[in-house]
Amino acid sequence: MKKELVCIVCPMGCRIRVDGIGDALTVTGQTCRRGEEYAIAECTAPTRTVTSTLHLEDGRSVAVKTAAPIPKEKIFELMAIIRAATAKAPVRIGQVLIPGIFGTDIVATAAVD
Amino acid sequence: MTEKHDIVIVGGGPAGLAAAVAAYDAGVTDVVIIDREEAPGGVLRQCIHNGFGLHKLGRELTGPEYAAVYAAEAVKRGIRILRETMVTAVSPDREVTACSREGILKIEAGAVILAMGCRERSRGALNIGGTRPAGIFSAGTAQRLINCEGYMVGKKAVILGSGDIGLIMARRLTLEGAKVEAVCELMSYSGGLTRNIVQCLEDFDIPLYLSTTVKEIHGRDRLTGVTVVAVDESRRPVPGTERYIECDTLLLSCGLIPENELSLAAGIPLDTITGGALVDERRETEIPGIFACGNVLQVHDLVDYVSDEAELAGRSAAAFVRGEISQEKTVTVSAEKGIRYCLPQRVHTDAGKTELYMRVAAPAERVKIVARDGERVLLEANRRRVAPGEMEKITLTPEMISGAEEIRVSLEAWK
């Protein structure tokens, strides 16, 4: 396999090249370890951190994210779950609002009084 | 009512907060931030996507989380933040006028730091033809409506401009169930970060049409569609390439303009390219004691660099308040061939290690950024690839600066 990628781990946008077959992948072009991990994951099981907003019972909303990246193909399934859910204010940053979903949690990224 | 404070900061976004914390830590504790919003954080409060803080904090945060880190640092130090208070004037002798529900406030400031951020280019400034229906938003307005106010802006969208906000909003609209028909970009390359093209467009199969613009807007009450057209190298529409795209929403992501009305009224000279103040290496404008940092000075692509620049301005303002002012002359820093602008625009000859920030004029591969004093080469920095959307920086040492007469920066082929 030979694949050229642009790393999305951080805004540097390193051009990474992945060569090899199966588990024997070699990664070149990255400038950090996270880039290497990203490139291998992208070629085997791509994941994304998803951010969105979640409704509060009082009509306001709060910004949320997946605490860890989830499989890329689950993004729209996750969005449907977030859209159907509600939480109750007050909410603090880092508070788990939906636990145990695709191996991670949905957590608040902003505080609401 | 007139108050006196050592440092007054105009704007409580990432620049204002970082400047305040840095000034405090440099020993000037009487610092006041004036912000017009109901909570500090500026535009980061609506930037709910992640990718902030990797350089500066070593972890990947969303916008609200990044803002909260700096707001907490300000609060911990007891720095006063005046909320819902709008600065209406800054005088050259550093009297700041602000208004809030309580009335008008005047502050005599030892130093002023301008951190007002920037605004989006509007439809009016773009001269797009056609009708004036509802459904046309600047990308940042749509972002605020969706992420902060809880309103969805439409079902079928076209986005004009492939800057980062446009790309982020293409993904956001898609996640919220809208169909993004196209992202059109006038230039032959995207102005956004490459990672955003990958994770916002390619992940969702959203087409990006380069060298394409919106020629006409259709619809009476609500937008019904747009006519897009290809443009040639001189950005003129190519007849016969028009195409109609049905949509109820048009987002405009066509550039950010530093919000310098206060600076202009204060008589602060601006750079015609950056749209921000002309500054020295400490981010002092040409009016003594008035500093500028963040997007009001130059539009950044990474908030991490905004924080760096703001900390520099904060430390410099603190030094000014303590009377530590350079008596040395300044030399000009000019952007030449291949470089659109370079900041700071002047440097004191006794400056310490100085970072020069710049944007290239066009994408290029295998190039070097060259800094010269007259004809003498001070520094060469190789780059595998450069793009206007990604800010570059080089670092000059005190030895390079001390003997210099003029510093010229250009982009050259890497041989």
Image (cartoon, coloured by chain):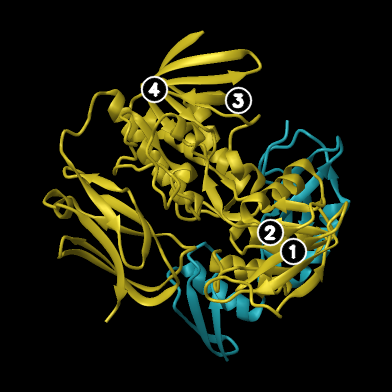
Chain colours: A cyan, B yellow
Q: Residue at x 59, y 24 (%)?
A: B85
Amino acid, disc 4: Arg
Seen from the viewer's position, the closer of residues B346 and B38 is: B346
Name the residue tied to disc 3. Answer: B83
**Going by the picture, which residue comes out furthest to the front?**
B239
- Residue drawn 52% across the image and 53% down it: B59
Residue under circle 1? B216
What chain is tagged by disc 1?
B
Using the numbered discs, state the Cα–Cα distance from disc 3 to disc 2 in whole angstroms.
37 Å
Subunit ID for the residue under disc 4:
B
Q: Contact (CB < 8 A) between labels 2 and 1?
A: yes
Residue B94 numbered mark, or none: 4
The answer for how far apart the CA atoms under marks 4 and 3 are is: 20 Å
Which residue corresponds to mark 2?
Answer: B128
SS class, disc 2: loop
Upstream in the sequence, badge 4 or badge 3?
3
The answer to whether residue B197 shows anywhere in this view is yes
Q: Amino acid at mark 3?
A: Arg
Q: As drawn, is B413 to the left or to the right of B164? A: left
